[in-house]
Structures are given as structure tokens and as C-alpha cells.
Amino acid sequence: MAIRKQRREACAGAVAAAAGLLLAVVVSLPGLLHATGAVSPPAAAASQAVRGEVMIITDSFYVVKDAVGKGMVQVLVNKATELDGLIKQGDQIVAQLSTEGYALSIKKTDER
């Protein structure tokens, strides 16, 4: 019995360490993407639209592969962002952005 308890505790510790590492990666992902130049921040121009394929989804932003060839674009989201149903990685979307770069709405499209 003591061996099972030790194994269970060791597994629980490994799972907690892995979860902590994953959280650290997700929290630092926006900074890493910008530092490497892999993702450009949303433009601060007047309200604009971003079209393309959803590559990454987090609680605070989406990374979209721009359909017009501008590379990857970070689309900031918040509680006010209107979502067209469940948006998943790989979906084609159009996001209407505010002047601050936040998505006002994100809708699925059939464009490929």
C-alpha cells in the first residue's frame, strides 16, 4: 500500500509540474510571438476587418493567418467580443476590429 501511495503522489507531482509549465507557456505566448516577429499586433487604424484561418485561440487573443498574405495577425478579444457560435482552430473567420485592436465581432465564413 505504501508503494502505491508513493507512486500516486509522484504522479500527482508530475502532473502539477506539467500543468505549471503549460500555464507558463500560455501566459508568455503573446510576448514570445511578438518577440520572434511571428505575429504582428493588430493595426490601430480606424475600424478594420481581418479575414483568415484561426491558428491559435486563448482567453485573451486569437492568432489568425491573414487571408490576404500579411502573415499572422493577433486579434485581441474580451467579454464584449461577439462570437458567431463556437470558433475553433482551423475555422475561417472575419473579425471586425475596434480602433484599439480588439475584436468587436468574430464570425465564421465559408471562404477558403
Image (cartoon, grey):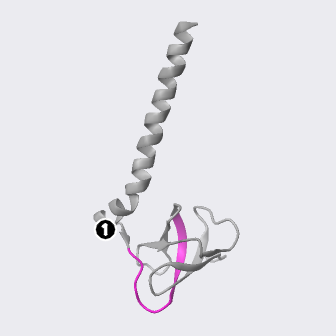
Say above or below: 1 vs 74.
above
- Residue at image point 59% right, 71% down: 79
Outermost residue, bottom direction? 46
Q: Circle 1 sits on which residue?
A: 37
Find out whether residue 42 is within the magenta segment: yes
- Residue at image point 33% right, 59% down: 32
Residue 94: % across, % down: 58, 79
Residue 22: % across, % down: 45, 45
Magenta-tinted stretch: 41-55
- Residue at image point 50% right, 24% down: 11
- Displayed quadrant of residue 93: bottom right
Which amino acid type corresponds to the residue marked 1 in the rendered image?
A: Gly
Say above or below: 5 vs 21.
above
Pick the residue in front: 110 or 13. 13
At label 1, counting other C-alpha atoms closer than 10 Å, the crowd grade (few under 14, some 14-19, many 20 or more) is few
Outermost residue, right direction? 85
Outermost residue, left direction? 35
Say above or below: 12 vs 95.
above
Residue 98: % across, % down: 50, 85
Residue 76: % across, % down: 48, 72
Find out whether residue 47 is within the magenta segment: yes
Element under disc 1: loop
Say above or below: 57 vs 104.
above
- How many discs mark residues in the rendered view? 1
Outermost residue, top direction? 1
Position of the C terminus, as image quadrant, is bottom right
